[in-house]
Amino acid sequence: MINLILCGGAGTRLWPLSRQLMPKQFVHLVGDLSLFQQTVLRNRLCSERIVVSNAEQYFLAVDQLDEIAARAPGAELSRFVLEPVGRNTAPAIALACMGLDDEAIVLVTPSDHLVADVEAYEAALRRAEALAAKDFLVTFGIRPTGPETGYGYIRAAGEDVLSFVEKPDRATAERYLKSGDYLWNSGMFCFKAGIFLRELKALAPEIYSACRAAFASLRTESRFARVGMQEMLAIPAKSIDYAVMEKSSCAKVVPSDFGWNDLGSFESLYDELPRDEFGNTLSTKHIGLGSTDNLILARDRLVATIDLHDMIVVDTTDALLVAPRGSSQQVKNIVELLQSRGSELATVHATASRPWGKYAVLREGEGYKVKRISVKPGARLSLQKHRFRSEHWVVLSGVAKVTNGDREILIHPNESTYIPAGQLHRLENPGTERLLIVEVQVGSYVGEDDIERFDDDYHRG
């Protein structure tokens, strides 16, 4: 089988842990590996791997694949399809399948789910593969453990799919659970690439045609194939469920029970984390008096609670979320509000990963921002300039190669340079150890989008 990993989600329901430039699949939420890394490892029996992502997440995925290469042989050979903008799951799957042999069996998995029982999971995969070999479109239905209202359901008779149903209200979910005829829709699929494309062409011809046009324009570079923006925008946005599975006459389901959790909310995350005798999630950063059944996530500061019950407290360097348990489905509304205000808090953490390294915002205020920047050996930032801000760079360790206008200079520890607003510049690490600098930005606007790139090793706009 070929494992097709869908990796473009933003995970807005787990903000502020998950943000656009570091979504939940790359965050270490449960255990010492990210959800993306766990996905790769539990599917390492697949012969190949294709990751569908966007350009920013591509570099996160490559770094995390490198981290687990010893445990997942061939991880570094993963191929990528890069989308400039997401158009939901049906186009993402179609674009990947169009590059495969018709007889290739594809296992489609989200990158941000949790599976507790890998042995049961592998048994379900083997059954799905057998059905896919007989030209069925196979989905995985999870036997429900409660009247969950956050999932779609599949009504089934054994392995026969009777219908797909939307997320129910509480009373309907309880009726589904009592009947025993319904399974949670996991969002995982298995089929031959050619069978899926045949069904897509018959059931959603407008998506198929637009994907064919986009596929014909793919630009291939080393490990990835990049889709053009205009071609991507021309594809109707629709999920595989709506476009194909709900209409197909060759759908099958594998009823499964392998400890699945989509970690789509803080409530579902609470269910997976170890807790103390009072029902509070275990944390060395939490002290509680008379507090019970709370999800407390703190990584930097101490969080102290008194007589707090059934609450969610998520403390990060630059944002604090407090909500009653049961209300976290509204977190995405907070993200939408931040986006409407143009706030970077919806997009990036105070510490942000970049393909060349990472930076951490140490302090910011009206007209200034202070960063600590770390550049990987041999890496360099884009050749760029800023309209509204000037920058002061001080080297802490390593040696910086700096393009500053028409000059190219080397800067050593405890030395600095000044980049005026509008000046073309670039930072590079020519050494074999990480370069660490402090950057002080000063100007009328210090947002991350004040950047004009002229040359970029990572092909960003």
Image (tube, rainbow, N blue to C red):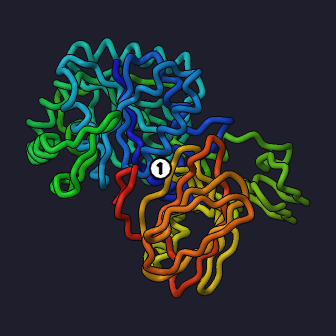
- For residue 97, what is the image quadrant? top left
Q: Please count the marks in the image.
A: 1
Q: Where does residue 35 sit, x and y in percent of width and height?
A: 55, 38
Q: Residue at x 27, y 52 (%)?
A: 87
Nearer to us in this view, 265 or 41: 41
Q: Where does residue 169 sit, x and y in percent of width and height?
A: 44, 54
* SS state under label 1: loop
Name the residue at the right extreme. 289
Can you say whether 252 is above or below 369 in the image? above
- Taking 172 as reference, is 91 left or right? left
Quadrant where the C terminus lies?
bottom left
Nearer to us in this view, 105 or 440: 440
Residue density around tag 1, few if under 14, some if 14–19, many if 20 or more, within 10 Å = some
Q: Residue at x 55, y 35 (%)?
A: 114
Q: Where does residue 200 sit, x and y in percent of width and height?
A: 15, 36
Q: Where does residue 387 sit, x and y in percent of width and height?
A: 43, 80
Q: Examine the rendering and report whether any part of residue 319 can be seen.
A: no
The residue to which callout 1 is attached is: 150
Can you say whether 280 is above or below 450 in the image? above
Query: Given the image, on which type of amino acid does mark 1 rest?
Result: Gly
Quadrant where the N terminus lies?
top left
Can you say whether 68 is above or below 271 in the image? above
Nearer to us in this view, 68 or 121: 68
Q: Examine the rendering and report whether any part of residue 103 can be seen.
A: yes
- Taking 375 as reference, is 242 left or right? left
Q: Residue at x 37, y 44 (%)?
A: 53
Can you say whether 445 is above or below 338 in the image? below
- For residue 10, what is the image quadrant? bottom left
- For residue 452, what is the image quadrant? bottom left
Q: Residue at x 45, y 71 (%)?
A: 405
